[in-house]
Image (cartoon, rainbow, N blue to C red):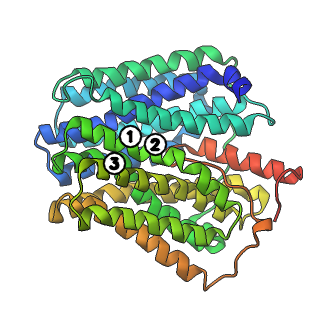
Amino acid sequence: MIKVFAGSWALLLGIMLLMVGNGVQGTLLGIRGDIEGFTTGQMSIVMSGYFAGFLFGSRAAPEMIRRVGHVRVFAALGSLVSAVLVLYAAIPEWVVWALLRVLIGFCFAGVYVTAESWLNNSTSNETRGQTLSLYMIVQMLGIISAQALVNFADPAGFMLFVIPSVLVSLAFAPILLSISPAPPFDSTKSLSVRALHDLSPLGVVGIFLMGGVFSALFGMTAVWGTQAGLSVLQISVFTAAIYFGGLVFQVPIGWLSDRMDRRKLVIAVAVIGACAAALPILLPMPFWALVGVALAIGGVSNPLYALLLAYTNDYMEHDMMAAASGGLLFVNGMGAIIGPLVIGRMMGVIGPDGFFVFIGVLTATLAVYAAWRMTQRPSTPVAETGPYAPVSPVVSAATVEAVYQDLADSSQDGTTATK
């Protein structure tokens, strides 16, 4: 692992700085929106805009790269990201913010596709698995570190918008200077949603639901925190706990995933998430207990996404796995766009508890649906399932395709279990 890091540290550092910049703006906007007097409904539209832009950008970026190349796409989109991060403070109007969120989501999607394709192509087949694992860890560490930066200045001022702009600009240097020449780019066509649903109804429905949960955690946590009366420090700690839980619990859930019926594990993990979300609604909780709830919710939501991907791929032929990733990311993106709009409406009607009600309802729905699906299809023997890969919802199609293509190649070589 150390040798792999030594060969890819510049790329990983650049990607981490990108994640720090993105993580700061996600939390900061939720806090600053309250300061500017934006309503919960208005902020839900603002937050939803990022996921709409990200979904569109994920689909448009491959064609952009093929037309003008990695370097031009990366530089152009990166410049736009830096500009948008400053424009938030310069134009504090919620409609403008919503449009800027669409633009920055589009840009970050293209930046991630470019950086991740560089990372994938800079490693050998023997080290790609370890490199991708490091990448997932770096992503989470970047978002967690971002929460600390939110406390470095007054959110009502200008400085916290400048910091992520500078970090994103600095991120380009190690990425652009460490790779020459730019790698070839060849994106895989996606399977249709109908075809994916026919192969794995639970995978498609579950990933759609988890898209809603993820968008609530990534986009609406700070909005909930301001409505609940938390301080900036408390909001940042609560948000960091979500991602720390997602990082830590990938390992035990992944270990169990390769040793038992994945549908039973989906049910168990989803029930834990629903129960954790119910606690703040049913009981008055001190802040330290809310941090425990954040650890639990984050600890199940991120691994559930990867678990559902692994389950879906159990019903794919090896040459379909990479193609399926694009369709599944589209399903997840649709759920992510809808999520903030629904949760914003719920919080507007019932108050801060709407945040946990939304997460609880979606995770409980997943558990019930998974239990029903167990009556419709026999279990796949554990020996015939593919390996679990700790894929995060924040990665682009470039990485998901690389992960599952790598697993498919390994399976064909006889190094992993085959169907």
Q: In this view of the protein, which residue sits in the foreground, 54 or 67?
A: 54
Foreground tag (3 vs 2): 3
Q: Residues within 10 Å of mark 1 (few under 14, many from 20)?
A: many
Q: Residue at x 32, y 39 (%)?
A: 237
Kindly indicate the quadrant of the structure image that contains residue 231: top left
Q: Residue furthest right?
A: 414
Label 2 to label 1: alpha-carbon separation? 6 Å
Residue at numbered disc 2: 244
Q: Residues within 10 Å of mark 2 (few under 14, many from 20)?
A: many
Residue at numbered disc 1: 240
Image quadrant holding the C terminus, namely bottom right
Query: Can residue 166 be seen here?
Result: yes
Asked if 178 appears above or below 107 in the picture, the reply is above
The amino acid beneath tag 2 is: Phe
Query: Can residue 342 be seen here?
Result: no
Left/right of residue 385 with respect to residue 290 in the rendered view: right
Label 1 to label 3: alpha-carbon separation? 9 Å
Secondary structure under tag 1 reads helix
Whether tag 2 and tag 1 are in contact, CB under 8 A, the answer is yes
